[in-house]
Amino acid sequence: MATHLITGAGSGIGAAVTRHLLDRGDELWLLARNAGRAKELADRFPGAKTLVGDLGEPERLSWAFGHQELPQQLDSLLQVAGVVELGPVGDLTPKVWAETLAANLSGPAELTRLLLPQLRQARGTVIFVNSGAGLAAHAQWSAYAASKHGLKALADSLRAEEKPNGVRVTTVYPGRTATPMQEKVHRQEGKDYDAEKWIDPESVAKTMLLALDLPRDAEVTDLSVRPGG
């Protein structure tokens, strides 16, 4: 039985991959930003354990984890959580930049740092769910795209550093996916939202499992997933 820690398990891609891993009997630890959210996740995914820590406050993660039980080893760290706030560079405030970079980049970096011993112990896999915005930035997307470009750099550096320890690192770049975040994006863009036009979160989850279950003689480094049709 493998052990996984998942961020963003409450909805969309994170919820989909959580269900798949629970169905096959793996041990799951779900990161929640507060105790109330942890209870919601525990009720929704019976059998999964929860860990409380806010990615939006990376400087507090070490303190938070010091007061909780942690897994002894991790076969995977699946980093799915993220936030988005669109707007032109001329309008985005330092607060928006700080919150976006914390949740999408500094938080995942600190979470990885804190859990590297457990990942090394299991020769585990880190999967970062990035975005098409992590490969190309467009108007209105500067803060989000900057955070995701940074997440790619984090993954690439981590891969090179941890290869001698047997830790594999994969970045998945989904295109627009039918998630609550995508609904928010459409509202910010002033567009009607039709989930049928976009990738099903299940499809991205299955892509993650493909990378996760790959035999040890190979490593998926980067995977782009785009809407079909």
Image (tube, helix red, strand yellow):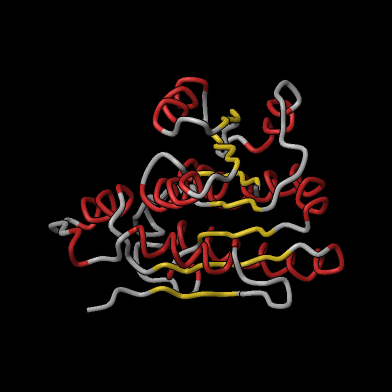
Residue 128, compared with residue 36, is above or below; it is below
Residue 115, compared with residue 215, is above or below; it is above
Viewer-closest of 49 and 81: 49
In the rendered image, the quadrant that contains the C terminus is bottom left
Q: Quadrant of residue 164?
A: bottom right
Image location of residue 115, percent across then percent down: 74, 44
**Residue at the image point whose x is 28% and y is 57% from the top:** 178
Q: Is residue 53 left or right of residue 40?
A: right
Q: How many marks?
A: 0
Q: Quadrant of residue 132?
A: bottom left
Q: Is residue 150 left or right of residue 142?
A: right
Image location of residue 197, percent across then percent down: 19, 67
Residue 221, compared with residue 109, is above or below; it is below
Image location of residue 165, percent across then percent down: 85, 62
**Residue at the image point whose x is 72% and y is 32% from the top:** 70
Viewer-closest of 63 and 22: 22
**Residue at the image point whose x is 45% and y is 57% from the top:** 144
Image location of residue 139, percent across then percent down: 35, 68
**Residue at the image point whose x is 57% and y is 30% from the top:** 50
Q: In the current view of this chain or complex, which residue is farthest to the right?
A: 164
